[in-house]
Image (cartoon, grey):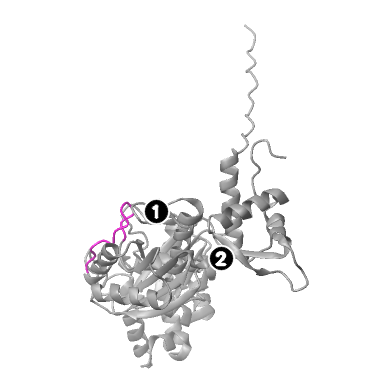
């Protein structure tokens, strides 16, 4: 019997976008461009989107009628007419708030829809109802009648399925009470996110990780934590505990960590108290930031780099992120000099190539990440009709549904033509 020749297979050509789909995609693209590069003229939008002039004119009319964009000026004093008008996003369409919640302080920033800060305030600690009242007062004084979205950065585990801040031993109960009070008192979407994850968002959008799709952010401060970004996605783990590197068992501690206490783990080597004690052992009694910046001497820096390399090498061996960012107030204080020392030691501990970088953002990264998250969450709802997400991060139950960090928030691609369009 002769051989059987298989029938040729063909791949069907992709169907053109429907008119409504094309309009939605083009509107979203135009709004992203206006967010990143605006205000822009219609001619600039035509060039940047690749759409025809009539399509851009229709797009501008649609977005203006929807109250999403407005005329923000003219492109030059000598030019007049419709092509000279500069269009920008209506910044006061919504007002947002970002909160950085620590064990000893709460900082809040109120912004407009573009993420521009309008007011900043310290909120009462340990008094959730008073903190809510202070936030609302700050918003009103900034001209915000109500808040559309509130993002809270806090230490502890956030359950991926529900977006709830879990009851974690060692953290004050008022953290959870504050989240509950905000959700109960405000009509806004209120989202809580682990502080280190928000720092990673800020580092990827604004800091030293802007060119990276994979990295581990190692937060060094009073506490120690990590955020894991692999292939452009934030990895939280099954319970939200990915990155709890303070509990990592390492040599050089007095014992082992437990489920309730990280005192015997990596935290015991590189947390602020441990760094301060190490500096004192080298004869320096000043602040930890000054010690890490070089004031405690070469021997101290060598010893600290050896400790940090244990955690960085563990992350490299398990995750192969390609880069570890030393973040937080101590990571920024150490700068490139400390990063270079850690890199030298990591190269001796693991065969996995791993770059070590020092943050340029430091402690404000958490608040910056919360501001970015609030802006992108609100814009996702107002611009795209999607709830709970923000540019790459997405959320469920008022949180980040899917809760993923995708890419670096850059506009990619050109506009779509609808079916039958030339």
User: Of marks 1 and 2, which one's residue comes earlier in the chain?
Assistant: 2
Residue 283: quarter of image: bottom left
**Do we see residue 171 in this rendering?**
no
- In the image shown, does 112 or 228 lie closer to the viewer? 112
| Front-lying residue, 37 or 319 | 37
Q: Quadrant of residue 239?
A: bottom left
Residue highlighted by disc 1: 395
Cβ atoms at labels 1 and 2 below 8 Å apart? no
Q: Nearer the viewer, mark 1 or mark 2?
A: 1
Q: Where does the N terminus fall, quadrant-wise?
A: top right
Is the residue 16 above or below the residue 335 in the image? above
Quadrant location, the C terminus: top right
Using the numbered discs, state the Cα–Cα distance from disc 1 to disc 2 in whole angstroms.
Answer: 23 Å
Query: What percent of the width, then of the height, locates residue 303?
Result: 41, 80
The residue under the point 48% across, 61% down is 376
Judged from the image, the secondary structure of the residue bearing numbered disc 1 is: loop
Residue 161 picture location, percent across and down: 32, 51
Part of the protein shown in magenta? 158-169
- The disc at residue 210 is 2
Q: Position of residue 353 (x, y in %)?
A: 53, 62
Q: Secondary structure at mark 2?
A: loop
Name the residue at 35% across, 85% down.
276
Residue 166 highlighted magenta (yes or no)? yes
Residue 264's tag is none
């Amino acid at each position: 019997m002769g051989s059987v020749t298989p029938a040729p297979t063909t791949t069907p050509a992709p169907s053109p976008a429907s008119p409504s789909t094309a309009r939605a995609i083009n509107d979203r693209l135009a709004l992203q461009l206006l967010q990143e590069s605006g205000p822009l003229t219609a001619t600039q939008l035509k060039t940047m989107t690749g759409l025809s002039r009539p399509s851009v004119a229709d797009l501008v009319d649609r977005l203006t009628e929807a109250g999403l964009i407005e005329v923000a000026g003219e492109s030059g004093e000598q030019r007049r007419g419709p092509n000279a008008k500069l269009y920008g996003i209506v910044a006061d369409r919504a007002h947002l708030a970002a909160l950085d919640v620590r064990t000893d302080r709460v900082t809040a920033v109120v912004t407009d829809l573009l993420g521009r800060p309008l007011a900043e305030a310290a909120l009462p600690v340990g008094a959730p109802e008073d903190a809510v009242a202070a936030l609302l007062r700050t918003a009103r004084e900034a001209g915000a009648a109500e808040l559309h979205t509130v993002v809270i950065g806090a230490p502890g585990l956030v359950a991926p399925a529900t977006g709830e801040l879990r009851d974690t031993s060692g953290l004050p109960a008022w953290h959870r009470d504050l989240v509950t009070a905000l959700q109960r008192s405000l009509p806004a979407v209120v989202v809580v996110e682990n502080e280190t994850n928000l720092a990673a968002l800020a580092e990827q959008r604004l800091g030293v990780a802007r060119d990276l799709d994979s990295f581990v952010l190692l937060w060094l401060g009073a506490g120690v934590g990590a955020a894991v970004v692999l292939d452009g996605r934030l990895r939280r783990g099954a319970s939200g505990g990915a990155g709890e590197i303070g509990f990592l068992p390492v040599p050089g501690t007095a014992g082992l960590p437990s489920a309730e206490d990280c005192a015997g783990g990596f935290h015991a080597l590189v947390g602020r108290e441990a760094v301060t004690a190490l500096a004192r052992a080298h004869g320096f009694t000043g602040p930890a930031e000054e010690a890490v910046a070089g004031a405690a001497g070469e021997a101290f820096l060598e010893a600290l780099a050896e400790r940090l390399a244990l955690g960085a090498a563990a992350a490299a061996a398990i995750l192969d992120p390609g880069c570890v960012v030393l973040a937080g107030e101590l990571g920024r204080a150490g700068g490139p000099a400390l990063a270079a020392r850690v890199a030298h030691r990591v190269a001796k501990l693991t065969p996995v190539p791993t770059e070590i970088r020092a943050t340029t953002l430091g402690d404000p990264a958490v608040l910056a990440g919360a501001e970015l998250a609030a802006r992108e969450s609100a814009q996702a709802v107002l611009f795209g009709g999607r709830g709970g997400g923000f540019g790459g991060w997405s959320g469920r139950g008022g949180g980040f549904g899917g809760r993923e960090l995708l890419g670096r928030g850059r506009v990619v691609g050109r506009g779509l033509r609808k079916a039958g369009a030339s």
